Amino acid sequence: MKYLPITDKVTLPALGLGTWKSSNGEAGRAVAKAIEIGYRHIDCASIYQNQKEIGTALAGALTTGQVKREELWITSKLWNNAHAQKHVQPALERTLKDLQLDYLDLYLIHWPVHFQQNIVFPKRPEEYLAPDAIPLMETWQAMEKMVKKGLCRFIGVCNFNLARLIDLKGQAHIHPVMNQIELHPFLQQVKMLEYCRHHQVLLTAYSPLGSGDRPAALKKANEPSLLDHPIILEIAEKRQITAGQVLLVWGLSRGTAVIPKSVNPERLRENFLAADLQLETGDLGAIDALESGYRFVDGAFFQTVGSPYTVADLWHD
């Protein structure tokens, strides 16, 4: 397993298990199996609506002594309806209750998008809040308090573009240790990667395999496929590994964490083994050439009629 430095004394397992799209009835079994296989990094979020089940699996592994709490790295995320300062701690406490934990290792602001309280996902324009309705630093200062109270060890963000990340770092008392963003050969985010390397921010790559199992409503017509790309398949055949392993090794080689989701035991094992595989320089260069700026998860679901949010505003630097 590769590890990424958070501080001089704290490291993060670079390969973790993603739990987005893991449905109830599957998520808990997947987490339990992943821990059995050797995974120690589990990525969660309240909006995935499977944290109670994951909590049962975590409690089972901890109670039986299969793993110690300090050996696990558990990440979760603050949803868009809890950005007001008074809502941050209650949201985190609900997550801790669901996960049956006393603290998180990492807590992230999930999106730079605001909803009205108690709105899980807006159906009408008035259920959104304007981008300036809750200043970013109000939410961040509340996140900092969660660290000081011992409810989470570290804090960070998710889906922040470079401009937002730079602005946050310039004002924060406790700096973000992580930005979790979409990262794969079609969307390599080189400027973000370079900035983070020089400013002690780690990157976690979500959708590292292309998120082909997203609901149809979240897909575009004629989406490209990473797992079926001829270059990826050629390298996989040459190295006698899977296409998924090729993509994960590429992500790990860039110094990013990767969190592929699976509920299939065989796939969980294959993904885990990728942490100890390597590709040759020529293979990595061929994959680098696949950059196309393509986003599978572009946030268009926030760009509904009357919404104050646009895809361009989310990602424009």
Image: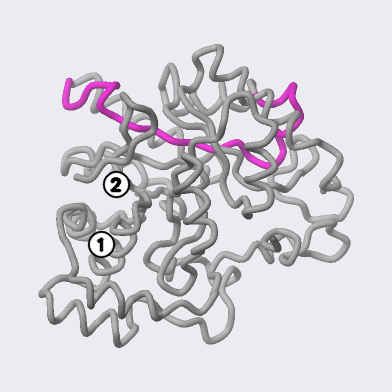
Secondary structure beneath dot 1 equals helix
**Disc sitting over residue 145 in the figure:** none
Above or below: residue 105 compared with residue 35 = above
- Residue at image position (30%, 65%) is 250
Count every numbered label the image shows and give the total.
2
Left or right: residue 176 compared with residue 15: right
Pointer 2 local density, CA inside 10 Å: few below 14, some 14–19, many at least 20: many
Q: Give the range drawn in magenta.
A: 65-88
Q: Name the residue under label 1.
A: 249
Above or below: residue 101 compared with residue 166 = above
In depth, the one of 38 and 278 nearer the eye is 278
In three-dimensional space, the C-alpha distance between marks 1 and 2, rounded to whole angstroms, equals 22 Å
Q: Mark 2 points at which residue?
A: 30
Left or right: residue 81 compared with residue 178: right
| Image location of residue 246, percent across then percent down | 25, 69
Q: What amino acid is labelled 2 in the image?
A: Ala
| Image location of residue 208, percent across then percent down | 39, 62
Q: Which of marks 1 and 2 is in front?
A: 1
Above or below: residue 263 compared with residue 35 = below
Secondary structure beneath dot 2 equals helix
